[in-house]
Image (cartoon, rainbow, N blue to C red):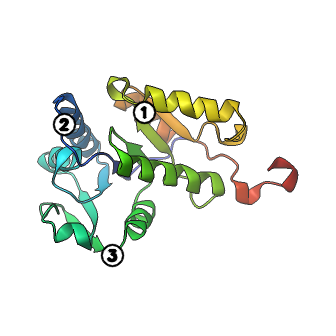
């Protein structure tokens, strides 16, 4: 069943790597989402991949909702150009807003904060807090090691087979979005019988 995506929470780095491909990628993804009429919900920053993502979407007339902790606003890294900028108190509130506002999650290259957001989205999906698709854009093979480790967790029995396909990974954005729209929710832990756990 195809479920149209109206808004995506996009996780990506606030850093600016030396390799210019990463900034170009984020800008291109923002622009493409806007062209498809998909709104962007993101961390609200103006630096690094985050800023490039928002810039790309806004340049194409797209909707960009930034969600940023107050502490980061005072550091002058908030992107005031967003369609809407929501200021929250904590990182937990920020991630809760991502889940509330978006129809799915898209992860671009990033660091520790990006991983925190991605794994919480996956964890919440396993448990049953949401049934939204979670996509990983493995551009430039950036996430090959992460995907190998994820397979290792499945093979070792730390990720249940029922949850092995929660994370949808592709190298190309078009195919990734296509698979995310066709995502069929798995059986969450909330609905499993004791013998399945």
Within-10-Å neighbours for mark 2: few <14, some 14–19, many 20+: many
Residue 26 appears left or right of 193: left
- The residue pinned by badge 3 equals 89
Residue farthest along the right direction in this orientation: 195
Vertically, is 4 above or below 25?
below
Residue for point 63% across, 35% down: 153
Vertically, is 29 above or below 38?
above
* Marker disc for residue 23: 2
Element marked by disc 1: helix
Within-10-Å neighbours for mark 3: few <14, some 14–19, many 20+: few
Q: Is residue 104 visible?
A: no
Question: Which numbered disc, 1 or 3, marks the residue closer to the eye?
Answer: 3
Gap between marks 1 and 3, in whole Å? 32 Å
Residue for point 65% across, 42% down: 163
The quadrant in which the N terminus is found is top right
Q: Identify which residue, 140 or 168, lies in the foreground.
A: 140
Measured as percent of width and height from the top left, residue 7 is found at 36, 54
Gap between marks 1 and 2, in whole Å? 19 Å
- The residue pinned by badge 1 equals 176
């Amino acid at each position: 069943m195809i479920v149209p995506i109206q808004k995506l929470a996009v996780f990506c780095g606030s850093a600016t790597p030396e390799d210019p491909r990463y900034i170009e990628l984020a800008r291109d993804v923002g622009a493409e989402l806007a062209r498809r009429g998909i709104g962007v919900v993101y961390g609200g920053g103006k630096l690094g991949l985050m800023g490039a993502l928002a810039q790309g979407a806004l340049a194409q007339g797209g909707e960009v909702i930034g969600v940023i902790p107050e502490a980061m606003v005072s550091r002058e890294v908030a992107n005031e150009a967003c369609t809407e900028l929501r200021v929250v108190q904590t990182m937990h509130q920020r991630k809760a807003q991502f889940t509330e506002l978006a129809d799915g999650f898209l992860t671009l290259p990033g660091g520790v904060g990006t991983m925190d957001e991605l794994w919480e989205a996956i964890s919440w999906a396993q448990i049953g807090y949401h049934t939204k698709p979670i996509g990983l854009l493995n551009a430039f093979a950036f996430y090959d090691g992460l995907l190998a480790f994820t397979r290792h967790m499945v093979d070792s029995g730390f990720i249940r087979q029922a949850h092995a396909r929660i994370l949808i990974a592709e190298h190309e954005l078009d195919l990734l979005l296509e698979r995310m729209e066709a995502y069929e929710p798995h059986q969450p832990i909330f609905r499993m019988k004791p013998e399945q756990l």
